[in-house]
Image: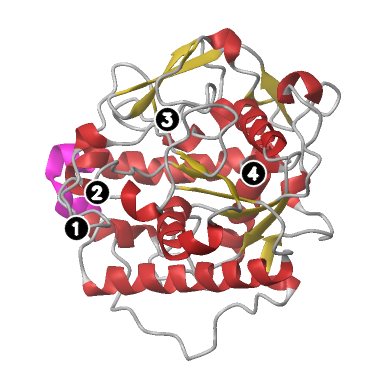
Amino acid sequence: MCVRRFLALIFILTLIVVGGAFALYQWGGNVLLKSATPQGHFVAPPPRSGPDYTSSDAWIARPSMANDPSRWYPELYSNGKDRYLGNMPPPTRIAAFYIHPTTYLERNHWNAPIDHPESRNRAELFVRTQASAFRDSAEVWAPRYRQAAYGAFLLKSEDAQKALDLAYSDVAAAFEEFLKQVPQSTPLIVAGHSQGSLHLMRLLGENKARLKGRLVAAYVVGWPISTTADLPELGFPPCSSTEQTGCILSWMSFGEPANPALMFDEWEKTPGLNGKPRERGDILCVNPLTGTPEGHANPIDNPGTLVPSANFSSATLAVGQVGAQCRNGLLTIEGEVPALGPYVLPGNNYHVYDYALFWGGVARDANRRAFAWR
């Protein structure tokens, strides 16, 4: 059931993004902006109206929560996880903080209402299929937050910036409660995808002093990081070996021939976190299969791609089918990609599948770094 609903979500998201992309190619950006811009202007919510992160209701996943979606396993994984992880579970207790991507698809508000049922359900599905990769390495905490509507990412306006700032204020508040609940001696993993990774970059920059000496790894996935304009402000280096800790992994998945113009044309026009210009040839890529920027992984090196069953009632891992290599800032995939669904975005962009393609690899990478932490 979870996979069926997840694929339905992907279908909706892809229709929006692909439809908008073709509109851009044929009629220009105004069509996409008109169809995506939230109605009216941003209206600030009342003070102290955000989620109460001392309550379990404000979390999608946290330790001891009943029906925690981050505790999900794909079929066959639990019976043979040693071959996926490569080591026994880490001997040290670790906590993971995960920020989900955009799941609010309406135009009624600049930010999702925290009680919006459809976006809440979709967020739970992303926790199930992405954050679950960390479950053997860490106890996962995943907050609900008043995410920015997808139109906020297409505009350079005061309304859009306020929407993003409100979303981040929830993430920051959740992170504060997370740190209060987790003992100070506990090492940490932080992770996100898409909008979640955008907020994660800001979170890293503002908390680098507190994370020094505690960060096992940061998985900033599905959002470009400039190595000269962004990375220095985050306070941590790229991961350069499988046993390195206190480092950052980031990737954006593309097939060949890759055409990332739709994603990067506007991104290049924005200043980086340190004020320097961003450039397309200066994007951080760390291969989740090798744990390094330079490594080339053959398909046989991939311990598992998350694939739905024929009737969409469950999911399993396809072992040894998808390889990957960092090229020009992109993670280019190779091999025979399993039947994930016909939802690849324009330019051979596998954004939707950034975690699914390498789910077993992410689990293995996190476990290796957690194991090395001792």
Could you tell me if residue 76 is visible in this image?
no
> Which mark is drawn over residue 5?
4
Q: Is residue 199 magenta?
A: no
For marks 3 and 2, give the one nearer the viewer: 2
Q: Amino acid at mark 3?
A: Tyr
Q: Earlier in the sequence, mark 2 or mark 1?
A: 2
Circle 1 residue: 275
Q: Dot 4: few (<14), some (14–19), or many (≥20) neighbours within 10 Å?
A: some
How much space separates mark 4 and mark 3, taking CA atoms? 19 Å
Circle 3 residue: 350
Q: Is residue 28 magenta?
A: yes
Q: Earlier in the sequence, mark 1 or mark 3?
A: 1
Give the main secondary structure of the magenta stretch. Answer: helix
Q: Dot 2: few (<14), some (14–19), or many (≥20) neighbours within 10 Å?
A: some
Where is residue 299? Give x, y as percent: 54, 10
Q: Earlier in the sequence, mark 3 or mark 2?
A: 2
Circle 2 residue: 229
Picture quadrant of residue 275: bottom left
